[in-house]
Amino acid sequence: MTPAASKQDMIVLLSLYPVTFLCGVRVQGRIPRGGGKPPFWPALLLRSVVSMLLLNWLAWVPCLAQAQTLSEADTTSSAIAGNPAAVNVTPGTGELGRLLGLQPEGGLHLGGVLVSNGNYLISGGNQPGATSFNNLLLADFEADLDRLAHIPGASFGTAMLRFDGQASNQDAGVVTGYNGLTGAPPLQRTELYELWWRQSFFSDGLVVRIGKTVPTYDFNNVVRPVPVEELSLQIPGVSGLLYTPIFVNPTILGVLPGYYNSAYGVTTTVAPSRQFYASWGGYDGNGARGVQTGLQATPTFNAYKFQIGETGTAWLLGPDNLPGSAAIGAWDQTGTLTLSTSTPQHEISQNGTHGVYAFASQRLWRGGGDGQASGMSGFLQLGINNSRTTMFATRYVGVGLTAFGMIPNRPADSFGAGLAWSGLNRNLGNRLHPDEALIQVYDQIQVFDSFYLQPTLTFSPDPGEKTAHAPAAVFTLQSTILF
C-alpha cells in the first residue's frame, strides 16, 4: 500500500466510525412494544438507505484517487471473516503502526479493525420494519519480546475494544443471533479486550498464552484457514458469514469466552507438526451466570470455571492437493447453574454442564491458470450438550459453502451461504419453537486493499423468541476496515 493510500485509509477509519454512529445508532425506527402507532416504514427505510449510502461514499472516496489496477499485494489478498475480532488473533494489518513509524522488523505491531453494519428487518420478528446499527472498533498492540528484549519465544499483546450498537437480534426474535457483531448488553461498552503473555518453546511446538484472552481464536474456530506452505493451496477464510454460530457453536454460546466477553485464563497448545495439534484451556467461567467478563479489568477466582480441550488435524486431498482440516473438542463448565421458570416456585438447578463439538472444512475445488487463489470450500459444524438451565441451545448442526476469487482480477472477493440449525433449550419458557434455523447468503466485496463491503440477507423460518412473528427476513450491509 502506498503512503497516500495509507493516509486515505486512516481518513476513512477516523470518519466512518463517528458518522455511522451519528447517522445509525441515534436513528431508532422501532414499533413501540406497548402498542401505539408504528413508525412509517418507508421513512425508516429511507433513513437506513441514506446512512448506508453515506457509509459507501466514505468508502469510495479513497478509491477514486487510486489507479484501478492490481498490485502484486492485491493478487495475494484473501477473503476475511465476517467479524475478525472474534476469530483472528491479530485482527488488523499493522498499517496504523507503520503510519506512525513502527516497522514490523522492529518487533512492534499496532493495528486493528473497524466493523460497521446497518440492518433492516424486512418482515417478521419482534419489530417488523425496524432498523438497527452496530459499530465495533478494536485496536491491537503486540510486541515481539524476542526481538525487543532478547527473551526467546516471548511476546506480549493487549487490545482495547469499543462497541456501540443496538439489539438487532432481539428485534428479529432470533435466539442464536443472525448478527454476530452485537451480543449481550450493555450495547455501549469500552473494555480491555486482551492482555496476555505468549511463550513459545521448541519452535512453536509448545505454546502457552496466559492473561485476558479470546478463546474463540483457539477453540471451535471453523473460520481459520488451513495452514499450508503454498499460497495457491490455501483456503483464504473458510467463510465470511455474519451470523453468531459461525463464530461460536450455539451449544457453547454463553459459557465459552469470546467476542466481546473475553476472560482471564491460560491456553496451552502442542503442535508436533503443521498437520496436528492439541489444545487445552482453562478460564474464568462466570460468563455462565451472566457476568460480562469482557468488562472485568481483573480476574475472578471462584467456583465458576470453564475448561475446554480440542485436537485437530489437516491434510491435502487428491491430485490437486485440496487442503482440509477437522477437529473435535469437549468442554466442562463448573458451578451451580439455575433457571427460573414460568412457575415461581419451580426453579431448575444443575451442578455444572458439559458438551462436545466438532467441525471440519475442505476446499472442494481449486481454479487454475489465472494466478489467483480461486475455488470453492465447504464447512460442517456439530455440537451437543447436557444443559437443562442457562444454555441457549442443546444441539447444533451448521453447514456452508464459499466461493473465492471467481471474478477475474478480483482475488479477494467471495460469496457464500450457510445454514445454522439449533435445537433450543426447551426449559427456557420464552421460546416458541423447539428449534431455530438461520439461512444466510452474502457477497463480500474488496473495495480496495483492506476495505470490504458485504451485503447480506438472512432468513429465519422459525425465530425462537416467543413474541417473534415468522418468518423473519433481514438485510444487512456491513463494512470492514483492517488497519
Image (cartoon, rainbow, N blue to C red):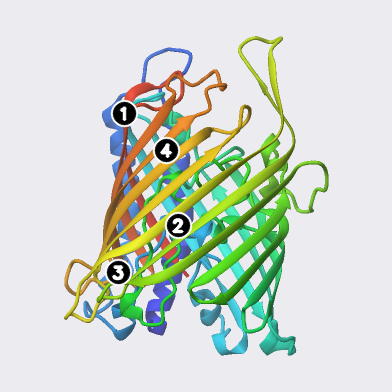
Indicate the position of residue 122 as horizontal and vertical percent values.
Answer: 29, 32
Mark count: 4
Residue type at mark 4 is: Ser
Residue type at mark 3 is: Ala
The label nearer to you, 3 versus 2, is 2
Q: Residue at x 56, y 55 (%)?
A: 216
- Does label 2 or label 4 sit earlier along the sequence? 4
For the question of whether residue 222 can be seen, the reply is yes
Indicate the position of residue 473 as horizontal and vertical percent values.
Answer: 30, 33
Q: Say few, some or many: other residues with alpha carbon within 10 Å of mark 2 (under 14 / 14 to 19 / 20 or more).
A: many
Q: Provide the secondary structure element on which disc 4 rests.
A: strand
Is residue 59 shown above or below 320?
A: above
Closer to the camera in the image, 372 or 312: 312
Residue type at mark 2 is: Val
Contact, CB < 8 Å: mark 1 with mark 2?
A: no
Disc on res. 412: 3
Q: Provide the secondary structure element on which disc 1 rests.
A: loop
Q: Decide if residue 199 is on the left or right side of residue 203.
A: right
**Label 4: which residue?**
132
**Whole-number angstrom distance, CA of label 2 to CA of label 4:** 28 Å
**Label 1: which residue?**
461
**Whole-number angstrom distance, CA of label 3 to CA of label 2:** 19 Å
The label nearer to you, 4 versus 3, is 3
